Amino acid sequence: MRGPVSLFGHGDRRRLFRWETMDTGVIARTLIAVGVTLLLFGVLLLAASRFAGIGRLPGDFVLGGGGVTVFIPVLAMLILSIILTILLNLLFRLFR
């Protein structure tokens, strides 16, 4: 009788769950960086919506009725996506 088969071929299943080989410090720093980035991004969006009128673009839809309002910022997200694409491309080229 053969031993257990792992997802990546034949072998011991315990190899898939070797947590002691993972560097938790790198994972922790990455999660902190992602959290800080999301926090800054949220603050930036909040400030932009109050001052620049980013929530009142022609392609942004507001659906409401029955005490519920749903805001769908299609054009705002498209513009934000283009700006972030340009900024991230410049950032990656700078550090390459």
Image (tube, rainbow, N blue to C red):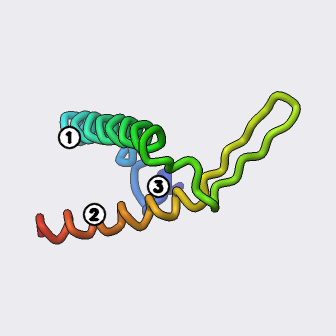
Name the mark nearer the viewer: 2 or 3: 2
Residue displayed at 12% across by 69% down? 96
Residue 82 x/y as whole percent: 41, 67
Kind of residue at disc 2: Leu
Q: Is residue 66 left or right of residue 27?
A: right
Q: Which of 58 and 83 is in front in this view?
A: 58
Kind of residue at disc 3: Ser
Question: Disc 2 to disc 3, how far (Cα)?
Answer: 42 Å
Q: Is residue 69 left or right of residue 55?
A: right
Upstream in sequence: badge 3 or badge 1: 3
Q: Residue furthest right?
A: 66
Residue displayed at 19% across by 34% down? 25
Q: Which label number is shown at residue 1?
A: none
Upstream in sequence: badge 2 or badge 1: 1
Q: Which of 72 and 89 is in front in this view?
A: 72
Question: Disc 3 to disc 1, how far (Cα)?
Answer: 26 Å
Residue 7 x/y as whole percent: 48, 58
Q: Which of 36 and 14 is in front in this view?
A: 36
Q: How crowded is mark 2: few (under 14 residues within 10 Å), some or many (20 or more)?
A: few
Q: Which label number is shown at residue 87?
A: 2
The vertical placement of 64 against 72, above or below, is above
- For label 1, the residue is 26
Report which quarter residue 8 is drawn in: bottom left
Kind of residue at disc 1: Val
The vertical placement of 96 against 51, above or below, is below
Question: Disc 2 to disc 1, how far (Cα)?
Answer: 25 Å
Q: Residues within 10 Å of mark 3 (few under 14, many from 20)?
A: few
Q: Residues within 10 Å of mark 1 (few under 14, many from 20)?
A: few
Q: Which label number is shown at residue 6?
A: 3
Residue 87 x/y as whole percent: 28, 63
Report which quarter residue 84 is drawn in: bottom left
